[in-house]
Image: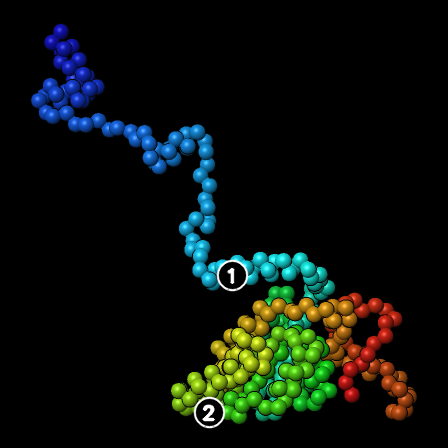
Amino acid sequence: QLGRDSSSALLQHFADPLAAMEADGDKAKKAHKKRQGGLKAKKKQEAKQGKVERHNPKAHTFSGGAKSVAKRVRYSLEKASKKEHAPRVDKNPDVPPPFVVVVQGPPGVGKTTLIHSLVKHYARQKLLNMRGPVTLVSGRARRVTIVECSQDMKTMLDLAKIADLVLLLVDASFGFELETFEFINVLQVHGFPRIIGVLTHLDGFRDNKQLRKVKKTMKHRFWSECFDGAKMFYFSGLQYGRYHRLEVQNLARFIAVQKCPILSWRQSHPYVLGLRWEDHTDPSLPETAPRRLDVYGYVYGGRLREGMQAHLAGE
């Protein structure tokens, strides 16, 4: 019986600790009281009822100021104006034709050197002599055709019509020349494709302060001719007869991500950039007889159907 009494006392001690503490003479601690009101109690009550808390992304952002109001107004106006324009349809096939890059600049500015540097970057091969357009693979589903533009006005007009991207080379030691301004005016007439400026011959400036001043002056002059924020690259000098590897790599990466501009005239008129031609004239005929030439290239723009009349640009 004594053992049963002691065991029952122990059970009572563990079952009611407050009573045990009062029996021992200690002061009883205050019991925990659950919150009946407030934000935390309200959240717990809603969670029990099954209500899901919705996150408001605009709750903790700054929604005032002149810039914010102007941005919202501009966005709403652009959204309304897009509905008024007919959507432009890209008629290029799933495997698009090569991206045409035209390299233009005055004589001696470094056009051929830039093309040799790009070929070395993409193909890991050295281009010995260039006899026309060069087509390279720049990505998994992208090819690039690089064309050098001469100073002939007919060549400028022809290449301005088919160029997807134009690299305008400018000699930093001399400045902008007349050929550059003429070509920019021709581009504006024919839809104005993507344009990137390349500043060369920067190795002639030894003073860093003068170099920064020339870069800033050339950049703002380029912006005034094209548009504010036009991209411009700076090539400092030559290494092994080519431009520096990192500078060419930055330019090549920028070319690789450029999107082809959708121009309405090009989408409605098919055209072909002839990459090579072969003479299939009968060898028994005299040299003065009409020649039969086969021109090879990729079709751009609309569909080229059988029997359509073609216009041969050039001489």
Labels in figure, total: 2
Q: Residues within 10 Å of mark 1 (few under 14, many from 20)?
A: few
| Nearer to me, 223 or 164 | 223
Q: Is residue 94 visible?
A: no
In primary-sequence order, the first of circles 2 and 1 is 1
Determine contact: label 2, label 1, CB under 8 Å.
Answer: no
Which label was assigned to residue 204? 2
At x 76% / y 75%, what residue is drawn? 272
Viewer-closest of 202 and 211: 211
Q: Amino acid at mark 1?
A: Lys
Q: Residue at x 26, y 28 (%)?
A: 33
Give the labeled residue for mark 1.
71
User: Please, what secondary structure does the residue beneath circle 2 have?
Assistant: helix
Q: Identify the residue shown where x is 40% and y is 90%.
A: 207
In the depicted structure, whether residue 54 falls above or below residue 31:
below
Q: Is residue 79 visible?
A: yes
Q: Quadrant of residue 271?
A: bottom right
Q: Is residue 30 left or right of residue 315?
A: left
Q: Is residue 257 left or right of residue 280?
A: left
User: Gap between marks 2 and 1, in whole Å?
Assistant: 44 Å
For residue 272, the mark is none
Which is more toward the observer, 133 or 171? 171
Tell which tag, 2 or 1, sits nearer the viewer: 1
Would you say 107 lies left or right of 88 here? left
For badge 2, the amino acid type reads Gly
Quadrant of the image containing the N terminus: top left
